[in-house]
Each structure stands twice: as structure tokens, then as C-alpha cells.
Image: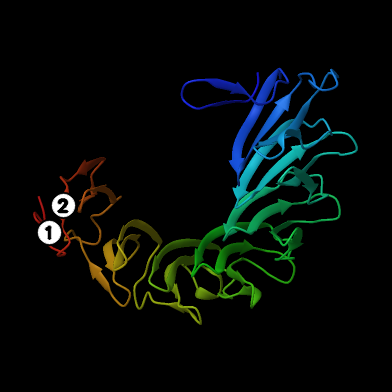
Amino acid sequence: RDLYSSDGTTFNTLSNWNFSQMNGYGIFGNSVWIIGYGGTNPDTSVAHTNNDLFVWNSGTGFVQASSMGFSAPTTHLATVGDTAFFSLYGGTGHTGSDLFVLNGTTLTQAASFGVAPAFVTSLGTTDAFFRITGGTGHTGTDIFRWSGGSLANISNMGASSITYLTSLLGTDLYFSVNGGTGHTGYDVFRWNTSAGWTNVSNVGASALTYLSTLGPDLYFSVMGGSTGSGYDLYRWNGGTFTDVSGDKNFSTLSLFAQDGNTGFFLGILGTDRGLYRWNGSAFTRMDTAGPSSIAAPYVIYNGDVFYFQYGRVGGPTTVWFPSLLWNSYFDFLNSRI
């Protein structure tokens, strides 16, 4: 196996290594990377074993970027701008898996924990974020940022778990964090270059889920902790984390569908069970069935029309009602059968 180029008429050989396997390839900047296994160096006639990274571009030609002989699993994680990121395992002088960074034809080992990193997200064309759990000299889970040629731990909590939620304004990243040094339960943490890593919810919840973004505001489903029992709808407006549920009592709260940037639909069970639309300031009840009749609503999106279907528990069986159709004017075309 080799790397070829084509102008649509003829093929040109770019590598000429006769690899046994090519275990990945991709484009970064003006270059192409491949993971080549086996083969023979055409310049020295020396056999090549295991996996290594190779790069081709019009300036340098085909270049061997690593000579460590990595083993499986050797994985491409992400490409951000002109830089490609890999989780590479084993190899000469290296144990376990670690984050490696390929820029041009230079491969750099960015971490030495001996555990596989997970790509989380990126900001712009220069910053990449990774989740690393455990490893040599590191306990728990943290988020690491690659920027300016180096890797830094931006959370530094050793949490039980960290889940990336969303980004906002092109500068702020939001995470759900469970446990960690000096912290109990689940909270929403924000990271940006000016304020760093900040707990913006401070509720220590039993469960926390990102639901939606409306304009500059983020919405979350929050259960337990300092919020009490049951679920509540919380809004983060960039300055305060506020319960906007009012007097409603929810035992579950889940997002059904986004209505552009003007609202979203929530399926809610509990004392106030039903299908609701939130417009950024108030709830509107969308279904007409009684509070005790809705067993499991869900939504199907088709063009500009939403179809809301309901299950009603009737004795030992569940009876499905025909769809309720809702258009952009908030009208039910047939409200109940």
C-alpha cells in the first residue's frame, strides 16, 4: 500500500514504501498525514516495523515524522488548524498511550501520563482541549488545553467525571463536573482565558444536563443538591444561575425539540406533567390531555411542523393517540382525538 495523488487522469506515487497497512490518513494545513505499518524505506532499503507517522506536502515530499514504532491502538484524535493530534501507544522508549502533536513534519509528545486522552473540543484554529483520566502522577479526571505549543491542566480538580456541554460566544466553554478536590456533586463550570476555570452553578446537584441555548442564555435540567428534590429548569445568563421553574413540580424534565432561537419544547413528568414550550420568560402548556393521562410524550420533526404523540395508560395496556400537529403560530390543527 502507498500514498498516491491523481489529477483525474493519471496516478502519481508519493510514498513508494510498500506498506503492509495504512492505518489512517488525513489532511492538516497543506499536508497529508498517514499512519503506515511495515514496508521498506526506499532510500535505505531498511525494513520498517510497527506503526509510524508519515507526512507528505509539496515542499518536503514524503517524510517519516516518527521513528518510534508505535503499536495499536494508534488513533487520530482531531485536526485543529494546521495541527493534528494523536493518541499513540507504546513505541521505543514509551509506555502506554499519550497525546502526540503533529505540526508540519515535527511530532511532539505533549503528555507523559501513559493513558489515552480524549479530544473534547477546540477554540479557533489554535486551541484544542482534551480529557485525561488517571495516569502517572495524575489522579481523577481533568481537562487539558493545548495552546502555544504546550499542554496545561485547566481544571486541576481530579474530578470523578467531566463532560463537555457546549460553547458560547466563541470564547467560553461549559462543562458538567462531578466531584473533585473541594467539590461535591454536579455543577456547571465555565472556562475562558480571562476568568479561567469557574463554578457558575454552585448547587452540588445529583444530576445535571445541558438542554438548550436561547440567545446569550444557557438552560439546564438540575436535580437535587441545594435545589431540593425533583428536577428544575435553570438558566445561566452569563452572571447568575437561576431556577426559572416557578411553582411547577417536575419529576423528570427532558428536551424534545428546539424552536429556532425563540424557544424550546420540554417533556415533563410529575405533578405538572405535560408538554410545555419555554420562550425565555414563561411556560406555555401545549397539550390538552389531563395531567394524569400523559405517559410518554415524544416528538418527530418534519419540515416546519412538529408532531406530538402521547401514550395514555388505560388499564393494563397503553393506547396511543394520533399525532397532534403544531405549526409556527402555536396552534394545534387537531387538538384531541
Residue 149 % position (x, y): 75, 58
In this view, the residue in front, 105 or 86, is 105
Q: Residue at x 25, y 54 (%)?
A: 294
Above or below 302: residue 161: below
Mark 1 Cα-neighbour bin, 10 Å: few <14, some 14–19, many ≥20: some
Residue corresponding to mark 1: 332
Report helix, strand or loop for mark 1.
loop
Residue 63 % position (x, y): 75, 34
Q: Are marks 1 and 2 in contact (CB under 8 Å)?
A: yes
Q: Is residue 322 left or right of residue 198?
A: left
Report helix, strand or loop for mark 2.
strand
Quadrant in the rendering for residue 74: top right
Quadrant in the rendering for residue 273: bottom left
How many numbered marks are there?
2
Q: Is residue 196 left or right of residue 151?
A: left
Q: CA distance from mark 1 to mark 2?
A: 7 Å
Residue 224 % position (x, y): 52, 68
Q: Is residue 303 left or right of residue 298?
A: left
Residue 26 % position (x, y): 60, 37
Residue corresponding to mark 2: 324
* Kind of residue at badge 1: Phe
Of callouts 1 and 2, the N-terminal one: 2
In this view, the residue in front, 151 or 313, is 151
Above or below 5: residue 258: below
Q: Quadrant of the N terminus?
A: top right
Residue that protrudes farthest toward the right in the picture: 93
Q: Residue at x 59, y 22 (%)?
A: 12
* Kind of residue at badge 2: Leu
Residue that protrudes farthest toward the bottom in the picture: 239
